Amino acid sequence: MADNHSHPITGSEEGFRSLLTRLEHQSLRPDFQIQRQLALSHALQPYFHPLMVPPLVPLPEEEDLARWFVYADYLPTDGHASLIEQVRDLVMEHVPQGERVWLDSLRHSYMDLLEVRDISAENEAVYARLQSLGDKQIFDVVPHTRPVPYKVGQVLLTRLLRGLADIRLPGPPLILSSSMGKAVFELTNEMRREIEIGTGNFALAEWAEFAKNFGYMIMWSVAKVRRGAWTVVDSQINYQNTQGETFLYAIALYEHHDFRSMADRLRELDQFTPPKKKAGKPSSTASQSDTLTWVWLPPQDPSDARTCPVARLTLTPTQLFVETDSADRLDTVKHQLAAAFGFLLHYQGETTAAPQLRTPEVDLLSDSYIAPPTIVPKEEEQQILESLLETAYLEWAERPSPLLKGQSPRHFCSAQQDTKEVAAIIDQMEQHDLGLRRTGQSAYNYNVLRGHIGL
């Protein structure tokens, strides 16, 4: 390992931390606060963009990078000296030599993307060999903490404090996977070339010159890559219930009047088969009190011992429940049902609203973006079902029903001067309530329907 850490001038970690505290205090002075806010909002600009959906927030390491940008790189727009110059020229306060020794190292530092090439020990000291992705320079660096939190091949977004006995990091770096780090570099390099061509400033061809003046663009690239990775992850969102099964949130309800005919035709529907656990039940002997189920299973992954349904049909004596894992699949199944049954089915309502979106975490250390399952708690599942049934049954008493020869429940009771048949239908609906089947709790108060017909 190259001996580039033998410079006679030394600086203590305590002195550097004290300098950072002093710079932070100086940046918070009333006459500099506006400049501080301008600098921070500039470095973290993508996160303040109104069209950033979802509204991602900066990581703690990005916030550190933004503060170091304020201390070391930012040139005030109102004529103020830079913060480092302000501290260097302080006459009303004593700045200890332990802090001053770090001023030049910090002033000349710049943000960089550094690939970890090696981590080794030398005379009981640990050094990380880092190579800049920008200009391929190699540095042997004293890690900021032990054990070293990064691995060979990963990329660090940080800045290096050079010019003293050892090259050091100012604090925890932002650690990126190899592919993500290189994607950030490519984005930044494109912006560098655009600026170079647009301004004619060919000095920016030197990576160090560009990084010192436009290092915040590396931070912008990180935000863009995070946003792109989030888009990939979001497109793979996999909702699961608390049992680890695919969560079927796109649901439609139908009413019917011919259980046996429905059962016979549903057995012939493409994609759907009886669930394995009920395979032994002789469906041909189904009576009017039976409930039959068919499921749509995706192609089985050889590595997955259990395949969960992506759609389910549940036939009760009075209703058909269609449950699917997406609005698109629900549309597909509805078209199949319309082609197969026509007017045998009477549409009651549906819901396609996905469960509450939780911004998925993007693992910056992963070379592939795979969304972890989003678990939908039973409480949220119950709310979805309650909302669906409340809407579907809102005007149930007034709507024509195939079970009552096309008459509405209210009109049928009035014409027949009898509520027994309608009461039996409500009892069947309550017995086979979708909430009872899915969460163990009824998702609707059927006394509301009974009240509508005078029970």
Image: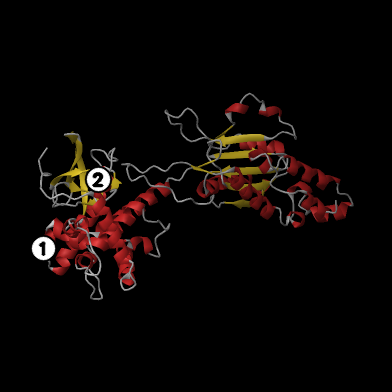
- Name the spot of residue 268 as percent of width and height, x first: 59, 35
User: From the viewer's perspective, is 116 left or right of 438?
Assistant: left
Q: Decide: few, some or many residues near mark 1? Use Cα within 10 Å; few <14, some 14-19, many ≥20.
A: few
Residue at disc 1, secondary structure: helix
Q: Amino acid at mark 2?
A: Val
Question: Which image quarter is the N terminus in?
Answer: top left
Nearer to the camera, 384 or 396 = 384
> In the image, is residue 399 above or below residue 255?
below
The image shows residue 129 at horizontal and vertical percentages of 17, 41
Residue 379: percent from left, percent from top: 61, 46
The Cα–Cα distance between marks 1 and 2, rounded to whole angstroms, is 25 Å
125 w.r.t. 14: above or below:
above
Q: Is residue 386 left or right of residue 222?
A: right
Residue topped by disc 1? 203
Which numbered disc flags the more N-terminal residue, 1 or 2? 2
Taking the spot 14% from the left edge, 56% from the top edge, the residue there is 207
**Observer-nearest of 432 and 418:** 432
Front-most of residues 346 and 155: 155
Residue farthest to the right?
417
Count of picture labels: 2
Q: Could you classify mark 2 by the number of other residues whose Cα lies within 10 Å: few (under 14), some (14-19), or many (20 or more)?
A: many
Residue 142 visible in the current orientation: yes
Residue type indicated by callout 1: Ala
Mark 2 secondary-structure assignment: strand
Farthest residue in the top direction? 280
Q: Residue at x 33, y 56 (%)?
A: 63
Query: What residue does disc 2 label?
Result: 155
